Amino acid sequence: MTRLPRIAAVWAALSLTACATTLGPPAPDPHPAQGWTPTEARLKAVGLGLPGGAVLAPGVDFAGGLEIVAAPGSALHSLSDLKLTGERGLVSVSDVGDLVQADLRLDRRGRLIGLDRIRARRLTLPDGSPIVEKADGDAEGLILTPQGDLLISFERRHRLWTYGPLSALTTPRPLRIPDFPFTENDGLEGVAAAPGGWRVAGEAGGVWDCGPARCVVVTPPPAEPVPDSEYRITGMDRDPSGDGWFVVERRFRPPFDARGRIRRMAPDGSLGPVLVELKLPGTTDNFEGIAAQARPAGTRLYILSDDNFNPAQRTLLLAFDLPQAAPAH
């Protein structure tokens, strides 16, 4: 979760330069699984905004975008990560302890044009009771293991919990995390599946590869934590090609210079060239989640923004397509 203050009205005005055509409402889930509650939303089409904002690397294409508009108390606010399930399923988590699922709606060209069957439920504590306190529910990262298990990382009370199979959630149990003194609001922000376990990126710096027995430092945390005013990793997913990861980074400089970008992370933790950069006067917000999917022509990436329950911010879901030979380092 970011410590961004209430964004100035000028940021909101400029960020709304993208097309905001209202889309068809989400199709309801007629038979939600036990424990899941259907969730309503309005959807608006979003483009990349005015020229000079978005910068895409050669070969990278924009593949559609949505703004998700929901009631003030909805579980669809403050979403902090996402991963994909199957060909069109999406699972997301909020930093107040909500778990959300939906189906991606694509057009005939495969472009993102909506969401359907949106449903939500509360995450639970080890005793099975639903999370109520913010300090318990500040979820920032999400992993779906190759076996289908759901792993959630939290900050404030730093931990990584496994909830078992997404299809049959259980009470959580703890998994190993780096032995490092993360500050309260700069914790396990980027998490993703890795060979033999999971990869963790701290928001203020540092990358580790962890497994049941231990965590190994990939990139040491810097002596001085990376500040909000510089790019920091806020989300991560495994490259479906199997060699490396994709990360989304965020930067904020008051009063309203909010930027996001996508890069590729190598196994040694080094970052490649910028694949996508989002900034004013184009579409931008507080991007914290990323998901990668193999497609016949390359890789589809989705990024998700956290609106912090702030009416001046938006919950955005944007899609980008990378060719088979994506820019690499």
Image (tube, grey):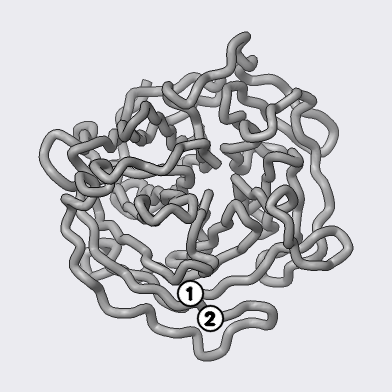
Report the disc number at residue 118. Answer: 1
Mark 1 belongs to which amino acid?
A: Ile
Location of the N terminus (image quadrant) = top right
Residue 124's quadrant in the figure? bottom right
Asked if the residue under mark 2 is in contact with the one under mark 1, i.e. CB atoms within 8 Å, the reply is yes
Dot 2: what SS? strand
Is 287 above or below relative to 101? above
Residue 96 appears at what percent x and percent y? 62, 56
Spatial separation of the CA atoms under disc 1 and disc 2: 6 Å
What is the crowding at mark 2: few (fewer than 14 residues within 10 Å), some, or many (at least 20)? some
Location of the C terminus (image quadrant) = top left
Relative depth, front residue between 91 and 280? 280
Apparent side of residue 103 relative to residue 201 in the rendered image (left or right): left
What is the crowding at mark 1: few (fewer than 14 residues within 10 Å), some, or many (at least 20)? many
User: Where does label 2 land, which residue?
Assistant: 38
Residue lying at the far left in this picture: please name it: 51
Residue 266 appears at what percent x and percent y? 49, 25
Mark 2 belongs to which amino acid?
A: Pro
* Residue depicted at 55% across the width and 66% down the height: 100
| Count of picture labels | 2
Relative depth, front residue between 153 and 106? 153
Residue lying at the far top in this picture: please name it: 223
Q: Earlier in the sequence, mark 1 or mark 2?
A: 2
